[in-house]
Amino acid sequence: MFSAETLQKFAREVAKYPADQKQSASMACLAHAQEEKGWLAPESIEAVANYLGMPPIAAYEVASFYNMYDLKPVGKYKITVCTNLPCALSGGYHAGEYLQHKLGVGYGETTPDGKFTLKEGECMGACGDAPVFIVNNRSMCSHMHPEQIDKLLEECK
Amino acid sequence: MAMLGSINGVLMEGLDGDNSWSLKDYVARGGYAQLKRILDSKMTQEDVISEVKKSVLRGRGGAGFPTGLKWSFMPRSFPGDKYVVCNTDEGEPGTFKDRDIMRYNPHAVIEGMAIAAYAMGANRGYNYVHGEVWLEYKRFEEALDQARAAGFIGQNILGSGFNFELFAHHGYGAYICGEETALLESIEGKKGQPRFKPPFPASFGLYGKPTTINNTETFASIPFILKMGGEEFLNLGKPNNGGTKLFSVSGHVNRPGNYEIPLGTPFATLLEMCGGMRGGRKLKAVIPGGSSAPVMPADVIMDCTMDYDSISKGGSMLGSGAVIVMDETVCMVKALDRLSFFYHEESCGQCTPCREGTAWMYKVVHRIENGLGKPEDLDLLNSVLGNIAGRTICALGDAAAFPVQSFIKHFGKEFEYHIEHKTCLVPKDVQWAGSGFHKIPA
């Protein structure tokens, strides 16, 4: 189900917790699983649960509670835009509108070529750098004005 | 972004952006010397806690609870595992200080946690890091590897016989996990839903073991308190408000960013450090402690100093020190609309008053913003918020209610105007200009 590399990452996470608390690693393992597969299909969640010896429903509860897990396929690049108040004061709404205009899709949608998914996000803890995006849950992009947005989209091959 | 300015800075002094976070730089700045001193001199746990109490360090995550007192609640002699947990789940809108601490001074957090563990007889720890700040999480893991290799954490630390294993755990997008018992649930690999208290974490915490949870900045302050002595740290600030504090300033200032200043510094001084108001516009309102803190009108905040007591007297909370600055281009209805959506979105759904109430508040504020408000809506909002506050397991319910209550209290006229005229008192193009977003090319 998962690559040797991902399984190695799983093992590293499990080692952080007491031997009888493997479930603690579910958040990190689900994140690694998503990183490999692009999204979390029910089979992936079940495989993580089996790996950790926890009921699949408990792993599904985790996957569905935290909003950075994708329970449906997303584009190659998932761009999450913070529009919370501190960001909005410095252009968060407008950056999102610009991005929607450029990509031709709204929040929660994926471009027809499957390249981009756009999401509206909550506070990312970088309000001083507004407008702020996160690409694929990993890469934080700061001060996203039109020029920077154009550049980002160009870099997403 | 690095720290943009400081007055009598302590935590973030002598840093050189991305170039000085590693172990050797921290040691060169005198890092880990306090942990070593405590272990070498076999300083008693009581003495360590007493030094922290003297500093009047108050929790930097938002609640402002005295750290030394919190530490003294731990049953130090309880047999078996005991935990210290660092709360770096920095998701309170407006707050971005812990991210910089993790980025530029992660070893201060590790040393602070090790000292805390020693003082409370804990043998294991976790740092719970906001899922959105991945690079900082990875950097912290790297710092942990360095500290482990150098023998500052792990088994038999510096030959003292003291053991402390420390790991990083990341969140994955849930504001509620900043609440300490939700955070514990999350480390246990569950949905982050807060627990009933009591029992408090000091008696029933992570995996049911005694646990103390402190904020990142709180832990990072510990080595410096031990170094300069509690009293000197206290004197940096003002009585009952010890030390310096990081303030994250966002919104309509010329230089948004983090600033470290002594508690008790006038708000006007902080505003000046930020280069003043963007475009020289007029200050309208400030949320002084993260989005959950009541909003303060300009004239009230301008008379305040930045410390727990002064802000509290001014009708709000210092919270996490997240200062959201709003100028005259802000439509307060629209601002509240966004905040209300946030609390509705992030309510964990466990308590009915919060789950249903936040949805109601958002729905009503949103319809006012969109010109569909009814004359009785402000009374309705006050009634709904009154049925949330104080009626939920955790403070998210209160946090959702305070903004609504304070926005209506101080800016009720704007809400009434919206309801009556079905549009905003502040013209849309003025709002756009205020955001500073470069105009979309035609």
Image (cartoon, coloured by chain):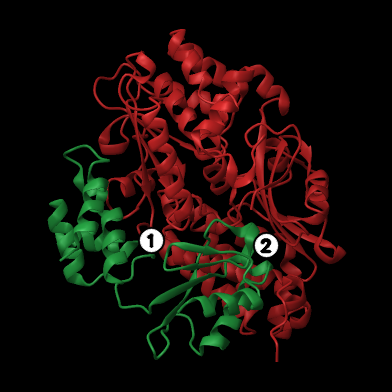
Sort mark 1 into few (<14), some (14-19) or many (20+) by Cα contacts within 10 Å. few
User: Disc 1 or 2, which lies upstream in sequence?
Assistant: 1
Residue type at numbered disc 2? Phe
Rendered location of residue B269, percent (x, y) = 82, 44
User: On the image, which quarter does residue B127 sit in?
Assistant: top left
Residue B45 — which label? none
Which residue is depicted at the point 53% across and 79% down? A153
Q: Is residue B282 left or right of residue B238?
A: right
Q: Which residue is mark 2?
A: B407
| Chain assigned red | B
Under circle 2, the secondary element is helix
Residue type at numbered disc 1? Thr
Which residue is depicted at the point 41% across and 83% down? A115
Is residue B65 in view?
no
Q: Quadrant of the C terminus of chain B?
A: bottom right
User: Looking at the image, is mark 1 or mark 2 nearer the viewer?
Assistant: 2
User: On the image, which quarter does residue B411 sit in?
Assistant: bottom right
- Give me the C-alpha separation between circle 1 and circle 2: 24 Å
Which chain letter goes with mark 1?
A: B
All told, the count of numbered labels is 2
Rendered location of residue A79, percent (x, y) = 47, 73
Above or below: residue B287 compared with residue A17: below
Q: Which residue is mark 1?
A: B352
| Chain assigned green | A
Q: Is residue A94 left or right of residue B72?
A: right
Query: On the same chain: label 1 and label 2?
Result: yes
